[in-house]
Image (spheres, rainbow, N blue to C red):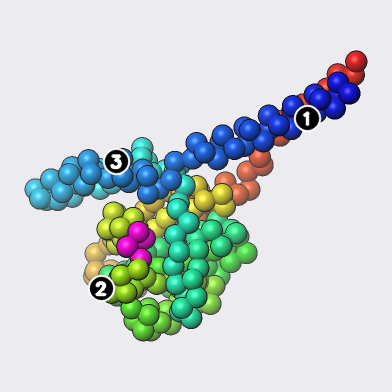
Amino acid sequence: MKRLLLLFFIIFGINIQAQSEKNDKLYFSDALVMHLPKYNKEAKAAYKYRQYEEADRLFDKFVETKLQGTYIDDFKLLNLKDKEVALYDYKKPVYLLTYASWCIPGKGEIPALNELAEKYQEKIDFVILFWDKKETAKELSKQFNSHINVLYVDETRNNHSYVVENLKHSLGLPTCYLIAEDREIMDIRRSVFHPFDISKEESFQLNYEAIDSAITNNLIEKSNKPEPVTLSVISPK
């Protein structure tokens, strides 16, 4: 009887701990509410005085100290068949890239992304989110291979304000979110910016190396890392 009671309290304690850990999670949207106004004020001043290196430093610091380690909200988006898709529907780590038709990617960015989606298709879910009408997103989707999921948010329909406010208006475009299997945000990065006069091959190489490094360091290594195992030993009476 004592052993059964002891086992009950161990299981009960584990459940309480798991529930506590769940409730202790800080979500991306909440972190933005707390910290985005201060970041915006500092970044706006840096851009006003053309202090671009300082602006980049502020962005990196904001991500590293306030957003990394938070958990992405379960945003609801639409695929090109107008079916609702939630970010938590994906079971693998997610490489999420927010785009828009008025954002002009580097010459080699999409080819690099296509090749890496082919390489990591078994381990990563690649998601492109367009801030455009369905027709525009559908046309732009032709640039991406079949291993990349293309979703969209049409602001003119005015039913995605929560997503728009948190994902688009907060950090600008294009922005890449590296999201672990448990939906923890491992990193947030902006696309590679390089001179327009470099060759397509050079652009491809720069983008390929940057994206591959981000995926390897933030998603692949985390998913391959074994979880710690805690053993409880009950001494016989």
Quadrant in which the C terminus appears:
top right
Q: CA distance from mark 3 to mark 1?
A: 42 Å
- Label 1 Cα neighbours within 10 Å, binned few <14 / some 14-19 / many ≥20: few
Label for residue 8? 1
Residue type marked 1: Phe
Residue at 35% over, 59% down? 162
> Front-most of 153 and 16?
16
Q: Is residue 120 above or below residue 60?
A: below
> Do labels 2 and 3 touch, CB within 8 Å?
no
For marks 3 and 1 on the same chain, the one whose residue lies earlier in the sequence? 1
**Boundaries of the magenta span:** 160-164
Residue at far left of view? 49
From the viewer's perspective, is 18 left or right of 136?
Answer: right
Q: CA distance from mark 2 to mark 3?
A: 28 Å
Element marked by disc 2: loop
Quadrant in which the N terminus appears:
top right
Q: Place residue 34 in its image quadrant.
A: top left
Place of residue 226 in the rendered image (x, y in percent of width and height, measured from the top left): 66, 42
Residue placed under numbered mark 2 in the picture: 102
> Front-most of 14 and 68?
14
Q: Is residue 226 above or below residue 2?
A: below
From the viewer's perspective, is 216 left or right of 206?
Answer: right
Q: Is residue 52 shown to the viewer in this render?
A: yes
Q: Place residue 166 in its image quadrant.
A: bottom left
Residue at 39% over, 58% down? 176
Element marked by disc 1: helix
Place of residue 149 in the rendered image (x, y in percent of width and height, measured from the top left): 50, 71
Q: Is residue 231 shown to the viewer in this render?
A: no
Q: Is residue 163 above or below residue 24?
A: below
For marks 2 and 3 on the same chain, the one whose residue lies earlier in the sequence? 3
- Label 3 Cα neighbours within 10 Å, binned few <14 / some 14-19 / many ≥20: few
Residue placed under numbered mark 3 in the picture: 35
